[in-house]
């Protein structure tokens, strides 16, 4: 009988889904992704998570519940670190425990630890452990991992070329521009807006209140951190006064510094979720870099489970109007005030 592995559509899924899907399918398992976030998933998540948790963790728990009775295993790895000498948010590190203690009667969990601060040998042991839920054949696990890495590299390349990992993270994982959008981009008349924030905030259609689609419908060219070379982001992040050891923070701040220097966007929208400890520091540093060093219009949107979409729409409209005025009238203003 085929083993069914459930992957909750939350948190790291927008960054790593192609990798894990390919890995488990290559081993012969069936991978089941929870449904796109909707009101019922959000409500269930809120009901089954401690109040203090951030919105993405609540949504994640809603997705675990969506899979609960459909799969043999639920995939909730314990992610400690994905880059050497860096760490991920503490909520990722304790995620399996948080889920187990919030939701009773779950199927067994694949909760292997991922920690890139350990040796390469340890990394391969980790891969074997992930594979052992399906097979004990190490050769087969190694081959599946290599295949998964190739698929992951292809996915990253697509993101860099401008694709977005929206809710449709079933093959081909990403959406690309329509013909009309391509033409507007080519004409150079489109507004270019950078959207920043954690991938699970930006690309969860329901949780983000469809931010990406709202911008795309206005034929706005979207820039994301994934489209910028990670080496370049890292170079900028290296110039920070103090080493940023949170991977999320490092990526966002490095991007802020890059945008402040390049000034190649008309505005920046930072989407954050209420209750995020990391964002409470990063968004402030980000805004300072952008406003003081770049002079680029900046909009911070913080959402939680009670945020109304109408309010977000009004703020977006006002922001876009301001950018239009600025583009149109800036040259007419006297430099002397
Ligand atoms: S980084 Fe922030 S939003 Fe993401 S899981 Fe941690 S606390 Fe939540």
Image (cartoon, rainbow, N blue to C red):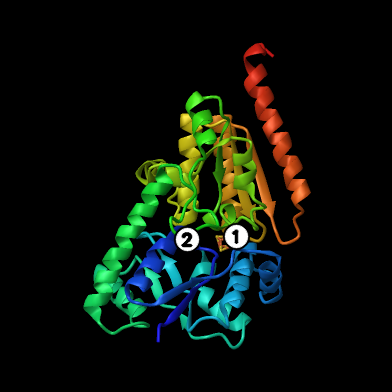
Q: Which residue is drawn at 50% across and 24% down?
A: 187
Residue 42 left/right relative to 30: right
Circle 1/circle 2 CB separation < 8 Å: no
Closest to the observer, 167 or 336: 167
Q: In this view, does 117 lie above or below 231?
A: below
Nearer the observer, disc 1 or disc 2? 2
Across the whole image, how many numbered discs are drawn on residues? 2
- What x and y, as percent, mark residue 250? 46, 50
Query: Where's ligand 1: which quadrant?
Result: bottom right
Residue 239 left/right relative to 53: left
- Residue 264 visible to the viewer: no
Q: Give the residue at mark 1.
A: 277
- What x and y, as percent, mark residue 331? 62, 14
- What x and y, as percent, mark residue 24? 37, 73
Q: Residue at x 49, y 45 (%)?
A: 253
Element class at badge 1: helix
Q: Give the residue at mark 2.
A: 170
Closest to the observer, 273 or 188: 188
* Quarter the N terminus occupies: bottom left
**How far, Cα to Cα, is label 1 from label 2?**
31 Å
Q: Residue at x 60, y 73 (%)?
A: 61
Q: How crowded is mark 2: few (under 14 residues within 10 Å), some or many (20 or more)?
A: few
Q: Does the residue labelled 1 lie within 8 Å of ligand 1?
A: yes
Q: How crowded is mark 1: few (under 14 residues within 10 Å), some or many (20 or more)?
A: some
- Residue 250 visible to the viewer: yes
Sequence-first disc among 1 and 2: 2
Q: Residue at x 44, y 58 (%)?
A: 171
- What x and y, as percent, mark residue 235? 37, 42
């Amino acid at each position: 009988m085929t083993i069914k592995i459930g992957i909750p559509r939350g948190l790291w899924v927008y960054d790593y889904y192609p990798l894990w899907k390919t890995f488990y399918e290559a081993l012969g398992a069936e991978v089941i992704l929870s449904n796109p976030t909707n009101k019922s998933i959000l409500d269930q998540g809120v009901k089954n998570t401690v109040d203090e948790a951030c919105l993405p963790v609540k949504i994640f728990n809603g997705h675990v519940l969506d899979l609960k009775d459909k799969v043999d295993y639920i995939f909730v790895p314990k992610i400690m670190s994905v880059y050497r000498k860096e760490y991920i948010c503490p909520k990722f590190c304790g995620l399996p425990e948080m889920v187990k203690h919030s939701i009773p009667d779950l199927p067994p969990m694949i909760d292997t630890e991922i920690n890139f601060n350990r040796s390469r040998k340890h990394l391969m042991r980790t891969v074997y452990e992930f594979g052992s839920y399906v097979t004990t054949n190490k050769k087969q696990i190694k081959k599946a991992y290599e295949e998964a890495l190739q698929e992951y590299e292809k996915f990253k390349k697509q993101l860099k070329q401008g694709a977005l990992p929206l809710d449709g993270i079933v093959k081909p994982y990403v959406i690309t521009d329509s013909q009309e959008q391509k033409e507007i981009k080519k004409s150079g008349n489109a507004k270019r807006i950078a959207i920043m924030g954690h991938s699970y905030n930006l690309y969860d259609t329901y949780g983000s209140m469809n931010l990406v689609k709202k911008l795309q419908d206005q034929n706005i060219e979207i820039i994301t951190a994934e489209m910028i070379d990670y080496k370049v982001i890292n170079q900028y992040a290296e110039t920070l006064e103090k080493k940023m050891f949170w991977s999320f923070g490092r990526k966002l701040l490095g991007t802020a510094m890059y945008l402040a220097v390049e000034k190649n966007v008309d505005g920046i929208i930072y989407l954050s979720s209420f209750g995020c400890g990391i964002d409470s520091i990063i968004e402030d540093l980000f805004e300072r870099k952008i406003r003081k060093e770049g002079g680029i219009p900046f909009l911070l949107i913080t959402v939680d489970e009670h945020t109304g979409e109408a309010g977000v729409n009004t703020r977006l409209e006002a922001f876009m109007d301001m950018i239009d005025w600025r583009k149109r009238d800036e040259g007419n203003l006297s430099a002397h005030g």
